[in-house]
Amino acid sequence: MLGDWLPLLRDLRVYRREWLARDVIAGLSVTAVQIPTAIAYANLAGFPPETGLYASMLPVLVYALFGSSRQLVLGPDAATCAMLAALLMPLAHGDGAYYLRLSAALAITAGLLMVIGGMTRLGFIVNFFARPILIGFLNGIALSIIVGQLGKLLGIVVQHRDFGPSLLELARRHAEAELPSLAVGLATLLILILLKRFAPRSPMALIALLIAGIGVYLAGPDPEQVKRVGEVPSGLPAFALPGIGYQGVQGIFMNAVGLVIVSFTSGMLTARSFAERNRYSIDADQEMRAIGLANIFSGLFGGFAVTGADSRTAVNDASGGKTQLVSVTAALATAGVALFLAGPLGYLPIPALAAVLIFSAWGLLDLASVQRLRGIDHFEFTLSLVTTVGVLAIGVLPGVVIAILMALLNVLIKIYRPPDTLMGRVPGLEGYNDLNLAEDSSPLPGIIIYRFDAPLLFFNAEYFKARVLSLVDGSALPPRWFIFNAESVSQLDSTGALALRDVHAALEERGVQLVIARPKLYMRKFGQALGVAEKLGTDNIFLSVRSAVESALERDSQRAATPQVSGAADGAR
């Protein structure tokens, strides 16, 4: 029971000694990326730099205990921080202290909503993210990270944040690139490439950043040319309840609902993407509770809203992290740095950090899977591309929402106009099968065997009726029997049952007998209540298609024999 709530304890029971070095190294590598990015994202949201560090300590540790993902690293996120600024700055009216309290209260409120959602099993919403969406999301995030770091690599302060405008701005301002900054970034990239080639199990990100930091410190280039992280205040967060008053709570509640969608969706997409890459499963309800608890603790201890950090998760994955001890190490290391190493941290070159993020993001690109989707299914290929383009063009959440809506619309279209099958004799196969399996297949004379491959519900009932009657009316030889193979009808509602009753009446008018084969148990529920079985007759309901065909053929024989007997009797008289 305790292991269900604390997955890390469950993982530690099967923990291997050789994993410890990898987890510690990965945790330190994540820390090396997490600290400066946390400061940068805090600045993006309008918070002091130490607030970003606070959001990278206790929340990361809490998620490590409660999360089911082995790779996901929580922390400040660009999309979340941008959303916080857009939502809360108008409410704060320029009051910085109140703005911090609002952000903390928003994190706590959103966290409570997620904990409640996880306990009531609302995590199922993540099941709407099909595999093509996951592939497209990961590719979009990778490209977004790469382009987002190009300005830092070149030493250019890019004004635009979106993918397209930032690319255009970089192209327009490429002449402003600082050569020392570019040299540091390219050298760091080269170190990472060489390490991956010759020492793939080494802490590549950590080694590259250490070399870059020491090199910049010794070379002493102009800080204006090679930007550094700069001074970071030291210290640990303290517990505080953010007092914002009743009106403040009213103002942030709906914002908290929107934040839940952004935070949980983004975190789960990242978690599921990496779980799929590493071939294990995660519990969506557990993830919702874990991310919610992390946000609650972030708000109570001086931080702001956090979610799954794709760049830090990518660094974790590339460094060979095996369990959430990576996040434990990263949280403790971040606290240690905040206490004792804030000074040396200031010498970390921003272009080197950008190079690490670009290198990690490049490993996320999965163009091979996109190419495979193209050969498997055109719609899934398009869905993956739409997700990627949507993430890049209109943002993570809107892009994913559009992709989900497309997937749902496709499902509805398939159910509204589902595939169906005419069955008959197929050479070389026993029983009655799809006539499309072979060119020399043949239907049974006077009998139509029809399979409807979808639930029969209110929104496709009219299509079902029209399809059945079109098959009967379009038949070259008028059929005497219509055998409805119901084995693929996985659901039925009252509208679907009424459609069956209407079909029976319409076929009766045409002199065709409706027969049902292989009905599900739920058909009895609706059939008895609406009188379908009564009108149809129990002698026209069969457990197999074979028995339905045999009964139809036998009754045809009896009908054929009856007039001959009557004629013989008349002749004798």
Image: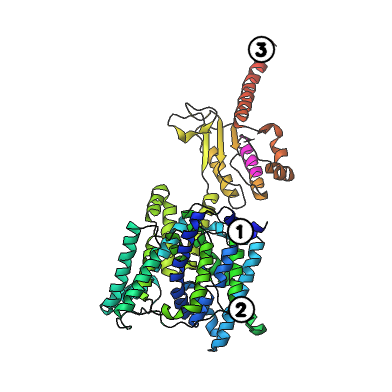
| Picture layout, residue 427 above or below residue 185 | above
**Badge 2: few (under 14), some or many (20 or more) residues near its Cα, within 10 Å?**
many
* Amino acid on which the number 3 mark rests in the picture: Gly
| Position of 154 relative to 508 (above/below) | below
- Dot 1 amino acid type: Leu
Q: CA distance from mark 1 to mark 3?
A: 93 Å
Residue 565: image quadrant is top right
* Quadrant, the C terminus: top right
Query: Which residue carries the number 1 mark?
Result: 9
The amino acid on which the numbered mark 2 sits, given as a three-letter code, is: Ala
Residue drawn at x 48%, y 65% as measured from the top left? 27
Element marked by disc 2: helix
Tell which of 11 and 82 is nearer to you: 11
Quarter of the image where one finds residue 525: top right
8, 374: nearer the viewer: 8
Span colored in magenta: 500-520
Crowding around mark 3 (Cα neighbors within 10 Å: few <14, some 14 to 19, many 20+) is few
Residue nearest the viewer, comparing 201 with 186: 201
Residue 481 vertical position relative to residue 455 in the rendered view, above or below = above
> Is the residue marked by circle 1 packed among few (<14), some (14-19), or many (20+) residues within 10 Å?
some
**Closer to the camera: disc 3 or disc 2?**
2
- Tell me the quadrant of the picture where the N terminus can be found: bottom right
The residue drawn where x is 46% and y is 63% is 26
Instruction: Kindly report which numbered mark, 1 or 2, lies closer to the viewer in this rendering.
Output: 1
Location of mark 3 (residue): 571
514 is within the stretch colored magenta: yes
